[in-house]
Image: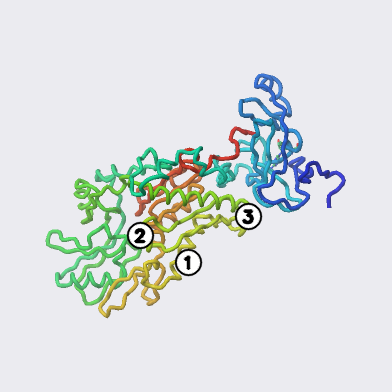
Amino acid sequence: MISPETWHLNPSRCYIKTEEGKGRGVYASQTIPAHTIIELSPVLLFTKPEYESHGRYTLLDHYAFVWRDGRMALALGLGSLFNHSSSPNVSYTIEPTRDCIKYTTARVIARDEELCIFYGHNLWFQPVGTLQLDCTHEETDPNWGGLLMIDDDKDIAKEDVKVDVWVDGNPDDIVAEEDLPFTRIKLSLDEEEEQLDAIRTMQAWVVDILDSKHIAPMLKWLKQSGLDSPALAHLKRIRRKAGSTTLLVDTSSTIPSLPDRVALSVPYQIPVPCTSALTTSSLELKNTFWPTVYTPRRKWEPEKWTKGKVRWAYDAMRLVAVESAKAAAQGELPIVSHVPQPYEELESLPQSFVAHDSRTSSNHPLRHATLNIIRQVADYRASQPIGSPSHNAIPVPIENDEPYFANGDDSGTPRNGAHYLLTGQTLFTTHEPCIMCSMALLHSRVKEVFYLVPMPLTGGCGGLTCLPALKPVNHRFNIARWKIGEYGGLSPIPVDTSLDV
Ligand SMILES: C[S@@+](CC[C@H](N)C(=O)[O-])C[C@H]1O[C@@H](n2cnc3c(N)ncnc32)[C@H](O)[C@@H]1O
């Protein structure tokens, strides 16, 4: 019920109400669908000198917008009464030809819900309901404002974007680095392999085999006990040195239990390299820790991308943008992650996955889109027939030809290969994954991550830190930032960033 002081002031039947701590605000008197234009506010424009010498010293300064050409604009109608929210339900764009500002709902609005816009991050007041200095919250990231800005309307308008470089022609043609619609984030890892003190190591359990006739049975035991894991595939299992033979067992934190009736020393821990050797010189250095596998292809050398693969990635990124708008319309944060079926080796993931961020609807702080998608893939893999390429348990053949699954327990129940969920897969996401999600991606063994919006305050893929570039981690993944606009082929951010409220 609308009280006498809450008038309907515009065709969308929005009304003004006063709330303690915020003053007047704009409210919906009825349900409003997503993407509805609720207000077209004409503006009063002040020249820069006029504003600098007068306006900025008055109350006007709490209301004026920076216009395209540097003039200051005061929105008339309801335009000056929208309050601020860090998760706004209204977006706005400048209409320079009509000297007005257009306000549009970003999602479905409930009756009597307040309509809020996003003012920016440098607020001059303490927003109602927020804690002072809440700098750790993800929403304080300066690019959070980009959340509502991913638009799918114009994204493949060819005349606006230079996508023809990879849209047309032979899908096997290589695309030049400068024509790729993304920028790769360099992990700068090659150099660290070349100096002894830069070699990344981890603690591993080893045991001396005291009788050489026990070498073959011990290797077999290793397989059967599931310790022959891909995580140690870059290391040789046996080291022969000064007449003694040593077996690499595992990297667990607890002392491994070894078979009885085999002549072995007590297990002990030593540092072993985290990755294979990329050059002969690093091989020599790494071998001083433990015999290491030589993989002469420089792992971090950028992979060549074909036109076909760029189109595949473009389709994936476009889906992310479209889903982001859908998520916003449903009232979620517009953060979306997507793992498509891979461009090659289709059998490694027979279907694609999309996950929205669901922190809002679930009222659960950990339901980030990336964690949600990893979980989706995990559930899918666990539901697949054991032994199929889409199940992640690692089959190891044993004597009676029944596969044994390297599941780390001996219960006989094969377990989902929790650490290998995204091996060889590519993740596309709206926002640079936070540190928590980046670590989950690292555990999942993802191959590469593409994101649209960098998150300098919270990102774990180059924003605040770059997890796959940290020394102690035992998996690397490639990271690339999709170019929004021109080359990326995805539409530019539609909310006008010159509206520096
Ligand atoms: C453009 S005006 C919005 C209309 C204003 N509430 C009024 O009564 O005129 C901006 C001012 O509204 C207040 N405001 C806007 N959003 C707010 C929020 N989330 N919490 C507290 N105050 C807010 C601040 O005082 C700010 O200077």
Q: Quadrant of residue 102?
A: top right
- Mark closer to the chain start, 2 or 3: 3
- Identity of the residue furthest to the left in this view: 243
Q: Position of residue 77 (x, y in %)?
A: 76, 36
How far is disc 2 from disc 3 in space, using C-alphas?
35 Å
How far is disc 1 from disc 3 in space, using C-alphas?
24 Å
Q: Which mark is residue 330?
A: 3
Residue on which disc 1 sits: 379
Q: Which mark is residue 345?
A: 2
Q: Residue at image x 34%, y 42%? A: 188
Front residue (pair 399, 383): 383
Q: Is residue 258 left or right of residue 125?
A: left
Q: Is residue 473 left or right of residue 77?
A: left
Mark 2: which secondary structure?
loop
Task: Name the residue type under label 1.
Answer: Asp
**Colouring chosen for the image of the structure:** rainbow
| The image quadrant in which ligand 1 is located | top right
- Give the number of marks: 3
Front residue (pair 389, 435): 389
- Mark closer to the chain start, 2 or 1: 2
Mark 3: which secondary structure?
loop
Ligand 1 near label 1 (Cβ, under 8 Å)? no
Mark 1: which secondary structure?
helix
Give yes or no for contact between labels 1 and 3 (Cβ–Cβ under 8 Å). no
Task: Name the residue type under label 2.
Answer: Glu
Crowd class of label 3 (few under 14; some 14 to 19; many from 20; radius 10 Å): some
Give yes or no for contact between labels 2 and 1 (Cβ–Cβ under 8 Å). no
Q: Position of residue 279 (x, y in %)?
A: 22, 47
Front residue (pair 170, 291): 170
Q: Position of residue 160 (x, y in %)?
A: 51, 37
Q: Quadrant of residue 445?
A: bottom left
